[in-house]
Amino acid sequence: MSTPVRKKAARKSPAERSAEVAAAARDVAIEHGLYAVTLRSVAARVGVTPALVAHYEPNMDALIASTFSAIVGAELTEVGELIARRDTPRERLSLLLATLLDGMRDDVTVIWVEAWALGRRNEALARAVREEMDDWRTVVQDVVVAGVASGDFETDDPASVAWQLLGMIDGLNAHALVHWEDSGHRGSRLGSAVEGMLGLPRGALAVPAG
């Protein structure tokens, strides 16, 4: 029986090949999770040998970390731009909760959950997770600080509010991955809790129209 002949990979510049490998790793992670990002899976996606991938990305821990950062960093940029279009801190916080808890970003939630687990033995990934969490806390804290300044929110510790809020969002979204309790109402449930934290009347963080 004849052995299939592998097509020789097209010659590309180091920058082009590195970008191709990075894009393939992101695609694999989104479709199958961070655990699936291996030399073989990335090579298969690119259509080259694992050895060629290893030549351009010799440290798989670093590739997994950069893949995580690229995926969750893009989400943060998108969400940041989305809430910036709202006029008031209350509207921005309401939209932030609705966007992160509507179930449409569960593919990224999987990336976060796997990163927390994998980061125990991958320091490059753990560092990337900490940096991205810091960036998210900054975004949320800025909204809370603006709300305190405008008189919309009441708290003397915006940093702690942001920290608690992110913890609750992450927890509820992780629970929803296994359909624990009624995940379809996670947004309204958290909204009620946050209203209490910030001295808002019930229903103040209802999803804004438009």
Image (cartoon, helix red, strand yellow):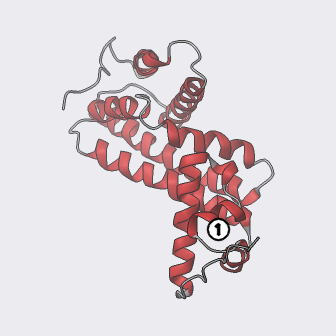
Vertically, is 183 above or below 82? above
- 44 left or right of 199 in image: right
Does residue 203 appear in the picture of this structure? yes
Vertically, is 57 above or below 93? below
- Rendered image quadrant of residue 179: top right
Quadrant for the C terminus in the image: top left
Q: Residue at x 55, y 35 (%)?
A: 163
Vertically, is 139 above or below 70? above
Amino acid type, label 1:
Ala
| 184 vs 98, nearest the viewer | 184
Return the x and y of residue 25 as percentages of the image width and height: 59, 61
Label count reads 1
Does residue 133 appear in the picture of this structure? no
Q: Residue at x 20, y 27 (%)?
A: 209
- 181 left or right of 97 in image: right
| 133 vs 178, nearest the viewer | 178
Tag 1 residue: 43
Mark 1 neighbour density, 10 Å: few (under 14) some (14–19) many (20 or more):
many
Q: Which residue is drawn at 55% across and 79% down?
A: 17
Vertically, is 68 above or below 157? below
- Rendered image quadrant of residue 98: top left
Q: Which residue extends farthest right? A: 121
Return the x and y of residue 81 as percentages of the image width and height: 31, 50
| 91 vs 7, nearest the viewer | 7
Return the x and y of residue 14 as percentages of the image width and height: 57, 85
- 9 left or right of 77 in image: right
Give the structural element (helix, strand or loop) at label 1. helix
Return the x and y of residue 180 as percentages of the image width and height: 59, 16
| 57 vs 3, nearest the viewer | 3
- Rendered image quadrant of residue 41: bottom right
Quadrant for the N terminus in the image: bottom right
